[in-house]
Image: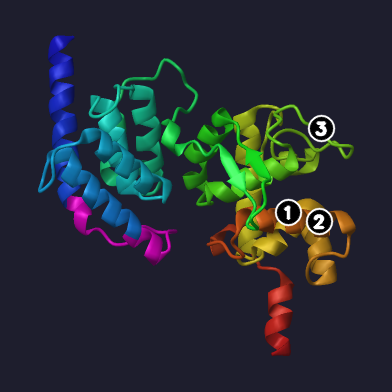
Amino acid sequence: MHIFQKWRWVVLSFLALHAAVTYSSEPVPRGIPGNVANNAEILVLQARQYEHGEGVPQDRKKAVELYCQAARLGSPEGQYALGWMYANGRGVERNDNIAASLFEMAAARGHAYAQKMLRFMPVPANPKAQLPDCLNRNIYARAKATPNKYYVNQSVSALVEKLAPQYEIDPDLVLVVISVESGFNVQAVSARNAQGLMQLIPETAERFQVKDAFDAEDNIKGGMAYLRWLLAFFKGDVALVAAAYNAGEGAVEKYRGIPPYLETVKYVNKILSRYNKTTHPFQPGVVSRTSFIFTSVGAEQ
């Protein structure tokens, strides 16, 4: 056992060193805006300096803090490096479950060494996703300066953080939808029989292969799959996506925009006030066609 642990440490050390050199000159990761990626890259470089004491006093706790900031910006290298710190107890208490979750996040964004690292991680005793506190988004505030705040359950936040990269969706958008739809109530049921965290009606749950709408992970996967589809269908227009999530894509196409339903108008305003972004990257290949709204607009112009 001692020999295995020794070789595991040697392999992990080699992969970490090789990745640090390789990814220091990597292009901007997909799905991350250039300015955000640049900020994340700077944070990673600063973190490495503190981790290794290069030009600054060695401070591994500071390195962990900086790696975590980069990870929150969606940096796969930040996620990978933070996982490495947890895998080896550098600046933090060792936690293989957290390390594995971080490696999974980075691997989902195409980080080759995170994918390799997962092969050497022990099977976690707790199969549920675990993330460090710095990645659990507990508070959401409105875009307008008001005292209203929105609580985010940590276990739900951890699941969203883990799963979002697989669907290439901003976890903030998913958490905002959950906050509006169910208030983070896993057992929520609406008058229209929409169920669970992301309030999936039975037809939508079946459409996106959700077996148990009251299982948090299954529900979130189905909701993310639907959001990914809507983002592609409406070309990343967050307002139209929100309207369709509430009233259905058919209603949005019928009215060529946000349907004039009071509930839907309020819903869209609530989503936009909490999310702060009007557009989101999308994957064209997810749908066979985009909404004719965009075709008709192009024809009119």
Quadrant of image for the C terminus: bottom right
Using the image, determine if residue 66 lies above or below residue 244: above
Camera-side residue of 75 and 64? 64
What residue is rendered at 10% in x and 48% in y? 55
Q: Do the residues labelled 2 and 1 touch (CB within 8 Å)?
A: yes
Q: Where is residue 284 in the image (x, y as percent from the top left)?
A: 56, 64
Q: Which of marks 3 and 2 is nearer the N terminus?
A: 3
In the picture of the structure, the residue carrying the numbered disc 3 is 189
Answer whether residue 116 is visible to the viewer in this image: no
Nearest to the eye among marks 3 and 2: give it: 2
Using the image, determine if residue 254 lies above or below residue 190: below
In the picture of the structure, the residue carrying the numbered disc 1 is 270
- Residue 73 is left or right of residue 163, and the answer is left
In the picture of the structure, the residue carrying the numbered disc 2 is 266
Using the image, determine if residue 267 lies above or below residue 52: below
Q: Which of marks 1 and 3 is nearer the N terminus?
A: 3
Circle 2: residue type: Lys
Residue 8: name its quadrant: top left
Q: Circle 3 — which element?
A: loop
How far apart marks 3 and 2 lie (CA) works out to: 20 Å
- Point out the stretch of residues depicted in magenta: 22-38
